[in-house]
Amino acid sequence: MNAAPSSLVIVSGLSGSGKSVALRTLEDLGFYCVDNLPANLLPDLVQNMASDDLRRHRVAVGIDVRNLTNDLRLIGDLLTRVQAQGFDTKLVFFDTDDAVLIKRFSETRRKHPLSMQGLPLSDAIAEERRQLQPLVALADLVVDTTELNVHQLRKRVLDEVQGHARSSISILFESFAYKRGVPPDADFVFDTRCLPNPHWVPDLRPLSGKDAAVKAYFEADPQVATYLRQVTEFIDTWLPRFESETRSYLTVAFGCTGGKHRSVYLAESLTRHCSAGGHDKVMVYHRELE
């Protein structure tokens, strides 16, 4: 399931086995995801994606029992046509024990797709297994989710697709002013109001933490150096842990009185540090400077 630069991942499996979680995980990894696509449209979809920009060269499609049965029997020929268009194809099938599926449907109170035909749930699952046999036979990987929770399933998908590389998490460093409130989506909030404030230096007041004179002011102060070092050590220590827990996004916010000097300087400093450390999804946002 290691994704090539131009790749199509088919996500299939039994209803309730975790296909939706897998597709959302692939979407977080940058795949263009389509669920419940009629199988016979696969070659047309790939052709359209190949003519688009580079972001569309990784495609994931959910195909399962909701598709027409005839389409499922033709999946082998359809994948051959996709491969002829220059796309690597991987078919991943998610399976789960019947007893667990019955429990999941009971807990969520969702209807099985084949229950619309008047079948009891156990019979619907058995019929679904029968109809999906063509996909199981072609699967490059079968994942049994019987004992997996949502987080473990996400990690399994990440491990299979990219070895769960460090760059899988997107990090946002944000500066803000306390007088306008703490950003509601912040995972960590650091209060920088204990640091010296350039606002009280007339020449620095109209500037921001992005300006060279303000940076020089902070770099000359040992308190700021200590604060920055300790926050950097905290991020370096705990960021790998968040990545191992399959987090896709992490927001670290720095606040000060006006959101113009101290918080901006810290957010910019951590952004440079993480970018230099090999994280390729690092962003910075200065709320009060927008």
Image (tube, rainbow, N blue to C red):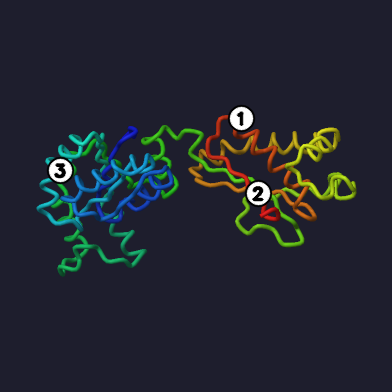
**Pointer 3 with pointer 1, Cβ within 8 A:** no
How many numbered marks are there?
3
Q: Residue at 25%, 56% (x, y): give it.
A: 36
Element marked by disc 2: strand
On the picture, is 45 further left or further right than 153? left
Q: Which residue is mark 3?
A: 78
Q: Residue at 75%, 37% (x, y): give it.
A: 228
Q: Residue at 15%, 39% (x, y): give it.
A: 81
How far apart are labels 2 and 3 at the CA level? 46 Å
Q: Amino acid at mark 1?
A: Ala
Mark 1 packing: few (<14 Cα in 10 Å), some, or many (20+)? few
What numbered label is drawn on residue 276?
1
Q: Which numbered disc, 2 or 1, marks the residue that appears first in the sequence? A: 2
On the picture, is 229 further left or further right than 126? right
Element marked by disc 3: helix
Where is residue 66? Give x, y as percent: 20, 58
Q: Amino acid at mark 3?
A: Leu
Q: Which residue is mark 2?
A: 174
Point out the residue furthest to the top here: 277
Mark 2 packing: few (<14 Cα in 10 Å), some, or many (20+)? many
Q: Nearer the viewer, residue 10 or 97?
A: 10
Q: Which numbered disc, 3 or 1, marks the residue that appears first in the sequence? A: 3
Where is residue 220? Give x, y as percent: 85, 33
Q: Amino acid at mark 2?
A: Glu
Q: Nearer the viewer, residue 175 or 122?
A: 175
How far apart are labels 2 and 1 at the CA level? 18 Å
